[in-house]
């Protein structure tokens, strides 16, 4: 019986890792100092809606809700990390304060009511998202992308993460 359980657990783990490798971006958490610099660079205000696309364990959602009193949403495709992030929100008592984690695909997520979008993804993922970011975000919304620029866009500001990696801030302007 124990052997079957070990084999089943091994098979699920291999399938989970294999599936993760098919994603455009793997999980890598942002450190606390860089996270704070990103939220400061975006000038998050109380009550604003912060959206973390590919939110991992939900750390940006927790920080934005707790330290900036923002309404924060994280979108994550990996069900294990979604459970982890939801548990974190619950334990931190932030679920009642407008913070939420959605199990879903960032490429089809609703962007229209975000004031700030956080990206710590890959060049490919940024490229796939950029048309929707440009057309669906409202005027004045800010995007901060850690490490990867958005191809062909001129950043409004460039900050620096803890390890010296760039933070690119973009502001959405009205249609020209
Ligand atoms: C580099 S991690 C960043 C995590 C978190 N934002 C942070 O900065 O700590 C990228 C995350 O995006 C998730 N991801 C990859 N493809 C996704 C997709 N299509 N939709 C939603 N999440 C996705 C991964 O599972 C991973 O947790």
Image (cartoon, rainbow, N blue to C red):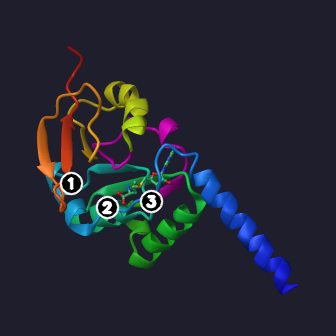
The disc, 3 or 1, on the residue closer to the chain's N-terminal end is 1
Q: Is residue 155 visible in this depiction of the protein?
A: yes
The answer to which of 108 and 24 lies nearer the viewer is 24
* Placement of the C terminus among the 4 image quadrants: top left
Mark 2 lies within 8 Å of ligand 1 (Cβ measured): yes
Whether residue 118 is in magenta: the answer is yes
Kindly identify the residue that appears in the image at 64 percent across and 59 percent down: 16
The percent coordinates of residue 41 (x first, y second) are: 15, 50
The disc, 3 or 2, on the residue closer to the chain's N-terminal end is 2
- Please report the bounds of the magenta region as a residue range: 100-121
Q: CA distance from mark 1 to mark 2?
A: 10 Å
Q: Are marks 3 and 1 in contact (CB under 8 Å)?
A: no
> Which residue is at the far right?
1
Name the residue carrying label 1. Answer: 38
Label 1: how many residues lie within 10 Å, few (<14), some (14-19) or many (20+)? many
Name the residue carrying label 2. Answer: 30
Mark 3 lies within 8 Å of ligand 1 (Cβ measured): yes
The percent coordinates of residue 44 (x first, y second) are: 20, 52
* Kind of element beneath mark 3: loop
- Please state which of the two labelled residues, at mark 1 or mark 2, is closer to the viewer: 2
* 98 is higher (above) or lower (below) than 145: below
Label 2: how many residues lie within 10 Å, few (<14), some (14-19) or many (20+)? some
Q: Which dot marks residue 12?
A: none
Whether residue 131 is in magenta: the answer is no
């Amino acid at each position: 019986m124990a052997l079957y359980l070990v084999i089943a657990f091994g098979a699920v783990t291999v399938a989970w890792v294999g599936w993760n490798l098919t994603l455009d971006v793997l999980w890598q958490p942002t450190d606390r100092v860089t996270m704070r610099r990103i939220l400061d660079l975006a000038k998050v205000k109380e009550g604003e809606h912060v959206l973390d696309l590919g939110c991992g364990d939900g750390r940006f959602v927790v920080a934005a809700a707790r330290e900036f009193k923002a309404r924060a949403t994280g979108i994550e495709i990996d069900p294990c990390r979604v459970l982890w992030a939801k548990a974190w929100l619950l334990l931190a008592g932030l679920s009642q304060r407008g913070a939420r984690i959605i199990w879903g695909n960032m490429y089809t997520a609703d962007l229209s009511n975000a004031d700030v979008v956080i990206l710590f993804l890959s060049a490919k993922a940024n490229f796939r998202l950029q048309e929707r970011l440009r057309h669906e975000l409202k005027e004045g919304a800010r995007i901060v992308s850690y490490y990867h620029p958005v191809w062909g866009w001129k950043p409004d500001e460039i900050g620096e993460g803890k390890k010296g990696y760039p933070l690119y801030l973009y502001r959405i302007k009205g249609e020209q």
